[in-house]
Amino acid sequence: MPRMHNERHRTERIGWLRAAVLGANDGIVSTASLVIGVAAASAARGDVLIAGVAGLVAGAMSMAAGEYVSVKSQSDTEAADLARERGELAADAGAEHRELAGIYVKRGLDVALADQVATQLMEHDALGAHARDELGISETLSARPVQAALSSAASFTAGAALPLLVALLAPAGSLPAVVAGSSLVFLAALGAVAGRAGGASAVKGAWRVTFWGALAMAITAAVGALFGTAVA
């Protein structure tokens, strides 16, 4: 009896990894930028922290709602396509068989083998075969709205808590610089971990996340400084 071996593919992580990385990155960048911008406007530490906490709560709720609505739209589209495919199978199974066999021919099988494969797969699970090979819908990559919403909200909260904690502990005179520097370190670590988890380069992952985070914080700090000067 041939020995089976287990294979772990990173595509299984796409659903939660995308939402988690997006949430954590947004949490760090938006909260750090908000804290830096308010601090650059010469606000008191208490006002900076209040703004940061408000940004954390609002951002987490926004991320959860946005991810749910976005992924639910994808899920609804998939459900509609599956319902239509189910109707087509019931109305004309022969045409659907020929369509599936044609897909396998385009992928490199000869006509006879493609016909045999289509027959056996449709006997086993006709809708599943068409969902996977015609529509590109699979169990691994299917939309999961609740999972995406919870992952985004939790990761945003975790990411946003980091610059807030630094703002609480940093000296008042150097608060913007300390928050900015530490947040860049957090972003680099996040990018590296996300890159490794997805099978990509940790260095490239760290670089792209850090670059865009630094740009966002720099622009926000400039706006805050200009606003503070104008008010003064």
Image (cartoon, grey):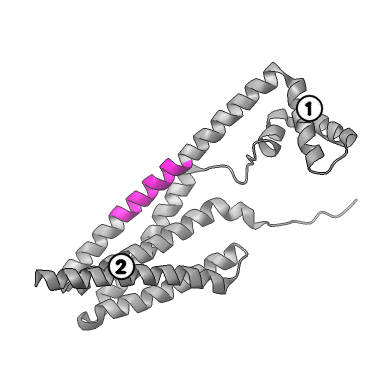
Up the image or down, 163 lies above or below 102; here it is: below
User: Where does the magenta region start and end?
Assistant: 58-71
Place residue 212 in its image quadrant: bottom left
Instruction: Indicate the position of residue 189 as horizontal and vertical percent values.
Output: 48, 72
Q: Is residue 202 above or below residue 7?
A: below
Residue denoted by label 2: 33
Residue 70 counted in the magenta span: yes
Q: Is residue 167 left or right of residue 155?
A: left
What's the magenta bit mostly, secondary-structure-wise?
helix
Q: Residue at x 81, y 38 (%)?
A: 105
Residue plotted at (27% across, 77% down)? 176
Please state if 79 lies on the left or on the right of 48 as rendered. right
Q: Would you say residue 207 sits in the magenta stretch?
A: no
Q: Which residue is mark 1?
A: 98
Q: Mark 2 or mark 1: name the one nearer the start of the chain.
A: 2
Residue type highlighted by circle 1: Arg
The image's mark for residue 208 is none
Q: Position of residue 54 (x, y in %)?
A: 24, 58
Q: Is residue 137 above or below residue 22?
A: above
Q: Specify the farthest residue to the left.
A: 232
Q: The residue tagged with tag 2: helix, strand or loop?
A: helix
In the image, 81 versus 154, the foreground residue is: 81
| Residue 42: x %, y % from top left | 16, 74
Calculate the distance from the C-alpha at mark 2 to the C-alpha at mark 1.
56 Å
**Amino acid under label 2?**
Ser
> Residue, x 31% and y 64% (percent of image)?
31
Mark 1: which secondary structure?
helix
